[in-house]
Image: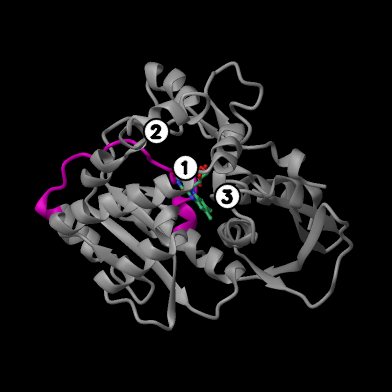
Amino acid sequence: MTPDLFQRLVAEARLAPSVHNVQPARWRLNGNSFDLFEDKTVRLSAGDPRGHDAAISMGAAIEGMSLAARKRGLALTETDEKGNGHEDLRFVARFTVADAGSADPLADHVEARQSWRGPFVAPTPQDRDAVRALNSDDCAVVADHTDIVALAKVIDDASFGFMARADFRAELLSWMRLRRGHPKWAQDGLNADAMGLGAVERTGASLVMGPLFKPLNAIRLAAPLLAEAAKTESAAAILLFHRPEDEVPLVSGRAFYRVWLEMEAAGFGAAVLAALADDPKAASVVTQMANISPDRRLVSAFRIGRRPAGVAYARARRAADDIIV
Ligand SMILES: Cc1cc2nc3c(=O)[nH]c(=O)nc-3n(C[C@H](O)[C@H](O)[C@H](O)COP(=O)(O)O)c2cc1C
């Protein structure tokens, strides 16, 4: 493995999704193998106290590396060897690469995939058939409009449960980049373009989530201002992503990224609805609604649909050299 090839692999692996776009994966080349570490300094103590979303994000980074390797006819193998981390840099796994023979068709969709948090184009009957085709052992697709409307309310209630917590809001705000002049606008976190915020919303977001939250909540205005029901209701479907109850999140994270790429391959844009899986009450409502068996865990959910034409935005990512340690 040459340093140049390694750098190119890391540059593609970093396009994987991560919670709040914190990008926890760090990579180190050691001759013919390379190590993956988790940067624990970007953990979300309020939003993800158990490190579950961080582990899903790390799994997505591994899948990103695997896809980058497969694009070059190489396959990733995890070895049993251990690398040296330290308190802030947790060793996760050591990998080698060998000839794979075949390419991975999902690798072709890595570049185009990005979160789409705006409204969707009204779904056609063909779109509804296409979303239903995404039903699989891991994915329950809710495509009936009445069910989507019912779920939109469940999602907003669950999200508001998290947003009502001052520590959660403060942490989320610290990862939001609302001004284009923010020094980390193009580097990490959630910038206003990625969140699909218009000019007025950019100013409003910091007020509603910051100093005005309490007074607005007192007059019951905070919840409607933060609600996303209209966007959810514009979706062609809600996709519920579930995996075996006892699976480690690193493995679920790999599958999470692949499912997202499958949606992209089918021409759909998607936004993650983590609150639906993270809120136990909401998770139980949807698992019952979609008949998901009790030996499965709802890992995440997405609202999906066709994006309006020409809505891609520049993605925020750290440079490859920045995450090679
Ligand atoms: C574990 C996990 C949880 C996420 N939760 C949410 C969420 O609740 N809402 C949301 O809009 N995006 C969520 N995302 C999407 C990330 O914010 C997104 O992937 C990241 O900002 C990078 O942007 P990209 O998807 O456009 O590459 C989540 C992603 C991961 C991996």
Location of the N terminus by quadrant is: bottom right
**Amino acid found under the numbered disc labelled 2:** Asn
Q: Which mark is residue 217?
A: 2
**Tags 1 and 3 touching, CB below 8 Å:** no
> Is ligand 1 less than 8 Å from the beta carbon at label 1?
no
Measured as percent of width and height from the top left, residue 32 is found at 83, 64
Residue on which disc 3 sits: 47
Depth check: give the residue in front, 133 or 165. Answer: 165
Measured as percent of width and height from the top left, residue 78 is found at 71, 73
Whichever of callouts 2 and 1 sits on the residue coming sooner in the sequence is 1
In the image, is 61 to the left or to the right of 243? right
Q: Main secondary structure of the magenta part?
A: loop
Residue on which disc 1 sits: 164
| Residue 317 visible from this viewpoint | yes
**Tags 2 and 1 touching, CB below 8 Å:** yes
Comparing labels 2 and 3, the label whose residue is closer to the camera:
2
Which region is colored magenta?
105-126
